[in-house]
Image (cartoon, grey):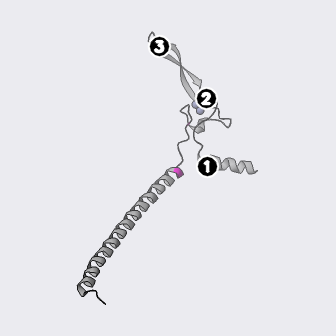
Amino acid sequence: MSGIPWWVVGWAVVIGGGWASENARRALRTRHKRKLERLAAEERKQQALSAASKPPEPVCGCTHHLAKHDKQGKCHEIVEAPTAWDADKKPVDYEPRPCNCQQYVGPQPLATVYAEDIVDLE
Ligand SMILES: [Zn+2]
Ligand SMILES: [Zn+2]
């Protein structure tokens, strides 16, 4: 310690040590925050994954289930088609008619896609 008084050294240690521990605390806090952020991101990813693995209801744009459509995609559900209207253009009479949907446009269930893949291989 040539020329430096002991109290300067002591002061430097106290201030420096305090600064270092404050820095360490801040780093720990940052790391903790990052960990929380990573956990939240992972949770979001898990939720997205479970939402994706849950197949959507295979319902066509014509509101009928995929099961009502044949292999060509034509819908065979019977719908009530209005055949008579009153003065307010409100239908008063209905007639059962096949749904005029020509093509299933709803989501394909995973099982169907899988089955189609197997058919393609044959
Ligand atoms: Zn339909
Ligand atoms: Zn349809």
- Farthest residue toward the left? 7
Up/down of 9 relative to 91, above or below: below
Which residue carries the number 2 mark?
A: 101
Q: Are marks 2 and 3 in contact (CB under 8 Å)?
A: no
Front residue (pair 113, 77): 113
Earlier along the polypeptide chain: callout 2 or callout 1?
2
Decide which of 94, 89 is in the foreground and name it: 89
Magenta span: predominant SS is loop
Ligand 2 contact, mark 2 (Cβ < 8 Å)? yes
Q: Residue at x 30, y 72 (%)?
A: 22
Residue most extreme to the bottom: 2
Residue on which the image places disc 3: 89
Give whichever of discs 3 and 1 has the lower sequence position. Answer: 3
Amino acid, disc 2 = Cys
Q: Are marks 2 and 1 in contact (CB under 8 Å)?
A: no
Q: Residue at x 49, y 13 (%)?
A: 85
Q: Amino acid at mark 1?
A: Ala
Q: Secondary structure at mark 3?
A: loop
